[in-house]
Image (tube, rainbow, N blue to C red):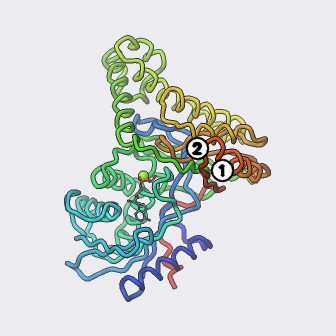
Amino acid sequence: MSTELNEADMAAVARGQKLFVESFNEKATVASAAPGRVNLIGEHTDYNDGFVFPLALEKSTYLVGKALPEGQECEVVSEAMEGVVAKFMAEDSPASESVPGWARYVKGMTAIYARNGYKVVPFRAAIVSDVPLGSGLSSSAALEMATAVLIEALSDLQVDASKRALMGQSCEHEFAKVPCGIMDQLISSRGESGRALLIDCRSLEATAVPLDDPEAVIVVANSNVQHKLSGSEYPTRRRQCADAAKAMGAKHHEQKISHLRDCTLEMLESVKDELDADTVRRATHGISEDVRTLKAKSCLENGDLAGAGKLMHESHVSLRDLFEVSTKEIDALVEIAMGVEGVYGSRITGGGFGGCTVTLVKKSAVDELIKAIEEEYPRASGGLKATTFATKAGKGARVVTHLLA
Ligand code: ADP
Ligand code: MG
């Protein structure tokens, strides 16, 4: 865990301490932070045991906290949820026990640490975040991983960063009822400054790939659209991928197929007639996206930004036409970006049905890109404004206690 000084960290921790004092009339002693993330390429591959290629944002969620005596309830406030103090016991408890929706991420982490045999000390905590909530940049994983690091610091626990991510994923499944893959928690837990991480979602092996070319910048553009149907569409896509893998497994049982990760387009062709057309399209994306993701890793290792950008855009086309998780607003953002000189590639990022795009762009073209989005997006989206920011690869989950005033 890094403890390097950083202006965003200092400002956020000061905000957190202020909220803590206002809420609890005392000062916090420990501060933790964990970043949101953006995925360069490798979308809807994590639950297929495939490859993802995210980077941690320079924006994080922070918890400032203090231990309470044994047997007391945890008390948590969030800057985003003004005035509400969520209270719960730091022990293995069912997801059904009521706390406000947002506090389930914190309570869920204490419950899962306790279930895994860790002795969790009760605490008070104040949450502040620079990660926009509900925009597809994984504020939920950031909250889980920042909570985890606070628990570890206050309870004096040593926990492997991948195990921490797995416990965060369980929290998200059980306490937030989101059947997510492992990417968000893993990159938030293990992210590295100046590097993207190629993650093998089967082995959880993560390979750091330098993303520190001074000429290359990542621009995230939030469409500010979140379509309601995302709730049922995500589990449906997962099931279609699993169905396709199962059909290929039955046909090619000598090959040990459990997920799309194990499949090829030739195998898919051989079971095409047993599957409906939607399922075939979803599986085509799942299989080809793994290939693109591994190629993009090679491109970045070789400094081939143009090659990586081309693969990012191919990924977008596949997500738009085969996986069908894009929207007209996101397509407009991608098209605007692709029309700007100096843009290497642009695509939808995150689960889909709204959210954000990620664009790899020459540093000298960033202003031009942001201007083009400001001018053209409202026209293409029926009056909406996009929110944009440029980022480099930031740090993973960490203790930042020394910044507490
Ligand atoms: P995303 O992870 O893409 O931001 P999610 O819907 O998965 O979107 O997670 C957003 C939810 O996580 C919020 O609605 C809230 O319940 C919870 N959350 C995230 N960050 C915070 C925060 N700083 N304070 C309170 N709740 C938060
Ligand atoms: Mg989330």
The residue positioned farthest toward the front in the image shown: 382
Mark 1 near mark 2, Cβ–Cβ under 8 Å? yes
**Local crowd size for mark 2, using a 10 Å CA cut-off: few (<14), some (14–19), many (≥20):** many
Residue 264: image x %, image y %? Answer: 47, 21
The residue where tag 1 is placed is: 218
In the image, taking residue 269 as reference, residue 106 lies left or right, namely left
- Going from N to C along the chain, the mark reached first, 1 or 2, is 2
User: Is residue 11 positioned above or below 56 on the image?
Assistant: below
Residue 359: image x %, image y %? Answer: 65, 45
**Local crowd size for mark 1, using a 10 Å CA cut-off: few (<14), some (14–19), many (≥20):** many
Quadrant in the picture for residue 97: bottom left
Residue that appears at 35% across and 51% down: 169
Residue that appears at 32% across and 18% down: 253
Please, what is the three-letter code of the amino acid marked with disc 1? Ile
Residue 232: image x %, image y %? Answer: 35, 39
Q: Secondary structure at mark 1?
A: strand
How many marks the image carries: the answer is: 2
In the image, taking residue 157 as reference, residue 330 lies left or right, namely right
Residue 91: image x %, image y %? Answer: 22, 67
Name the quadrant where ligand 1 sits. Answer: bottom left
The answer, for residue 336, to whether it is visible in the render is yes
Nearer to the camera, 395 or 326: 326
Residue that appears at 41% across and 85% down: 22
Q: Secondary structure at mark 2?
A: loop
Residue that appears at 54% across and 46% down: 39
Look at the numbered disc 1 and say if its residue's Cβ is closer than 8 Å to ligand 1.
no
Please, what is the three-letter code of the amino acid marked with disc 2? Leu
The residue where tag 2 is placed is: 40
Real-space Cα distance between discs 1 and 2?
9 Å
